[in-house]
Amino acid sequence: MRCRKARANLQALLDGALPASDEARLRDHLAACEPCRGHLNSLRLVDEALSTQPEAEPRPELAPAIMAHARAQRGRRRPLVPIWLEGWTLASAALGLAACGLAASRFLPAAGLPDELAVQASGLLPVALVAAFGLFGVWYYRA
Amino acid sequence: MIAALARSANLALLALGGRTSDDDTALVARAREGDPSGFDEIVRRHHKRVYTLAYRMLHHPEEAEDVTQEAFLNAYQRLSQLREAESVGAWVCRIASNLCLDRLRSPRRDTEVPMPSPDLAPADPADDDEGTSETVERIRAAVAELPPKYRLAVVAYYLRGHTYEEAARLIGVNVRTFKTHLYRARQRLIAMLKDSTQARGEPP
Ligand SMILES: [Zn+2]
């Protein structure tokens, strides 16, 4: 094993993530290579210094401030319909139904059009409207 | 429709029940149903970890508080997009990580917030009791000198006894990238340690 490869494996050894077969070969290298042993010691120093670092303490006001902001945010965005049916779902369904009715009353009796075309047109318009409105709803709620 | 599907998927997950953190899952469900106390508890439970991450990235208490708050509010707004409700804490950490990187990469930052030099960095008051050695202090302070993405890898890994996989998920990179960043960060820390030791004329 060369030093380059050994150094790459030292990190895994330190983190307990080195397979046993690699570990045996690394130990052989370490026994024979002083610079790599020194490197492992430095890594251990770094690891110890960072893993014993205590958590930082925020001011006690931080958590209540976040909660208050979240409540204020919620007040601004409160949905008008029950939570299981978000505003845009309901609105797009209603708009779709209205568009269906409108399209049917307009296109179906049109004398100049073949029946199949009229049916197609009456189907496509509401679909397009619902899709557009639905996309707008998704955008609004994600923004 | 998408949100409704996501919600039923989460209800299904809820029914299956996570072992370690189904409390978090329940809290997320409550918050989604409009119960603000659910989100309060999420904040109470996870804000110290998010703050610690931000503080170790930015080395500035007020900025760390700003990032912590922004991350939670961001998460609150997008709660319906969270797929794994049991890892809401990690999710907020990931949002905070990105906010920290944005701040560190902002061109205005260099002039506004000078990074503390390792020698001037104040010691953590909690350390005094434990009689922390000078070397330990120097190593901890040197983290502030690392390039942001390497710093983030180190901070995430040592945040709370993590595995590579958990730490990588915490900051939103793949495991391979994470290992490379952690490796380079440690190499640099060792090099900095050697430099400062030599500069003081101490034996290595
Ligand atoms: Zn070697």
Image: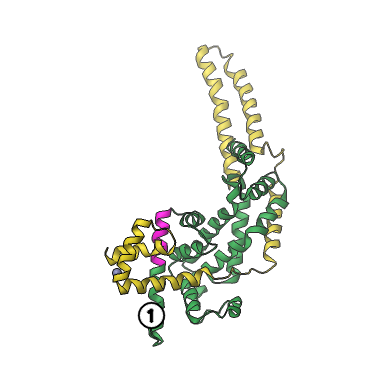
Chain colours: A yellow, B green
The quarter of the image holding the N terminus of chain A is bottom left
Helix, strand or loop under label 1 = helix
Residue at the location (30% across, 62% down)? A5
Is residue A14 shown above or below B9? below
Q: Examine the rendering and report whether any part of residue B145 can be seen.
A: no
Choose between A102 and A32: the one closer to the eye: A32
In magenta stretch: residue A45: no
Residue at the location (53% across, 16% down)? A118
Tag 1 residue: B195
Q: Does the residue tagged 1 have its C-beta within 8 Å of any atom of ligand 1?
A: no
Residue at the location (39% across, 64% down)? A11
Choose between A141 and B132: the one closer to the eye: B132
In magenta stretch: residue B178: yes
Residue at the location (58% across, 31% down)? A130
- Residue B149: percent from the left, percent from the top? 44, 63
Q: What residue type is labelled 1?
A: Asp
Is residue B134 shown above or below B159? below
Label 1: few (<14), some (14–19) or many (≥20) C-alpha neighbours in 10 Å: few
Q: Give the range drawn in magenta.
A: B175-185
- Residue B22: percent from the left, percent from the top? 64, 47
The secondary structure making up most of the magenta span is helix
Q: Specify the subunit that label 1 lies on.
A: B
